[in-house]
Amino acid sequence: MENIELKPSGQLMPTLGFGFWKVPNPMCKDIVVKAVKAGYRLLDCASDYGNEAEVGDGIKAVLDQGLITRKDLFVTSKLWCTHHRKEHVKVALKRTLADLGLDYLDLYIIHFPICVKYVPIEERYPPGFYYDGVGPKPIIDPVPYQETWQAMEELVDEGLVKNIGVSNMAAALLMDVLSYARIKPAVLQIELHPYCTRNQLVRFAQENDVAITAYSSFGDASYQSIGMVKEGKDFVSLLNHNTVLNICDQVERTPAQVLLRWAVQRGCAVIPKSASDQRIVSNAQLFDFNLSESQMDSLNDLNINLHFNDPDKYLGYPIFGN
């Protein structure tokens, strides 16, 4: 298994992780156990996923069974948009730690560069984007990102988290954070797949010692199942794309493995998920083959700058807009 050295801590982050977005709560415990047995050492969680307590049950199970020790497990979670004010950041982390049954996180990420009106945990958890739980528009709370980042740095000072990071961020905002950060972001987590290659952002981040974690490596797959996108005239599902399938034939691998390997060869970590025992295992089999330069180029050429997770589409908030 490969790792990425995080700066400034020097901690090693596994290149392969398991993501828990949209994993049903009753399945989380068993999936944690299956993932660890299959070789996954990074668990990617978030308060907004609403399943951290069940993931915590799984973590307890693998530790109690002696399958792994805490120091060999890398656990990530994310600060939600309702808790960006300085006085709310630690409160949110404490709830995440309690749900996961942990004393510290290996990585804590600001989920979106969007702050919405505060919803107390005891009132509704996870709160979602909308103050009233309905919408249709979020109530934006104009909190400077620097205020939130300084609160994140204090979590490192207190030993509650080992690394801090950002997500869903464009290059200009990352440049801004790097200009004032006392503790630099260790990780930038972004949507990354051949339809959305983010070449300039990935290059800039890596040149500045910010590691990249790629989510939604299969493109539209997760979003079609919840009705956010529909395959049609605008795109062909990446898992069915002829370019991907041709490469699969050449390297004798699955479409998922090819798409994950594409990101790994760009120096990125990946966090696929699956409820299938077979795919949990096969998605982890990424480190015994390589894609050729021409195969990488063919996948890169699919880029159409298509974000499936674009808050402008469902919030009217254009964080990636021109």
Image (cartoon, rainbow, N blue to C red):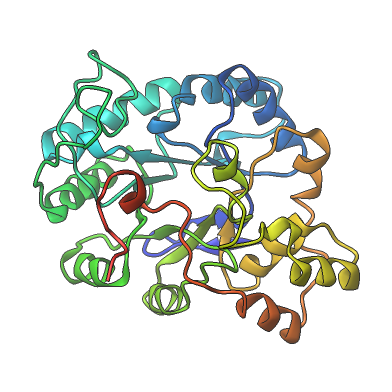
Is residue 186 visible in this depiction of the protein? yes
Residue 319, image x and y in percent? 28, 59
Residue drawn at x 32%, y 30% as measured from the top left: 128
Q: Is residue 286 among the parts visible in the rendering?
A: no
In the image, residue 276 sits, relative to residue 267, either above or below, namely above
The residue positioned farthest toward the front in the image shown: 233
Query: Residue at 41% of width from left, 59% of height from top?
Result: 187
How far from the left and from the top, in percent, is residue 219? 59, 56
Q: Is residue 319 left or right of residue 56?
A: left
The residue nearer to you, when weighing 259 against 14, is 259
Tell me if 268 is positioned left or right of 203 in this view: right
Question: Which image quadrant for residue 265?
Answer: bottom right
**How far across and how far down the image is residue 309, in percent?**
44, 51
Of residues 215 and 228, the one nearer the viewer is 228
Q: Quadrant of the C terminus?
A: bottom left
Q: Quadrant of the N terminus?
A: bottom right
Asked if residue 181 is positioned above or below residue 147 in the image, the reply reads below
Q: From what the image shows, is residue 156 above or below residue 260?
A: above
Q: Position of residue 169 (x, y in %)?
A: 33, 60
- Residue in front for this viewpoint, 275 or 187: 275
Residue visible at 27% across and 30% down in the picture: 92
The image shows a total of numbered marks equal to 0
Taking the spot 44% from the left edge, 74% from the top edge, the residue there is 206
User: Residue furthest toward the top?
Assistant: 122
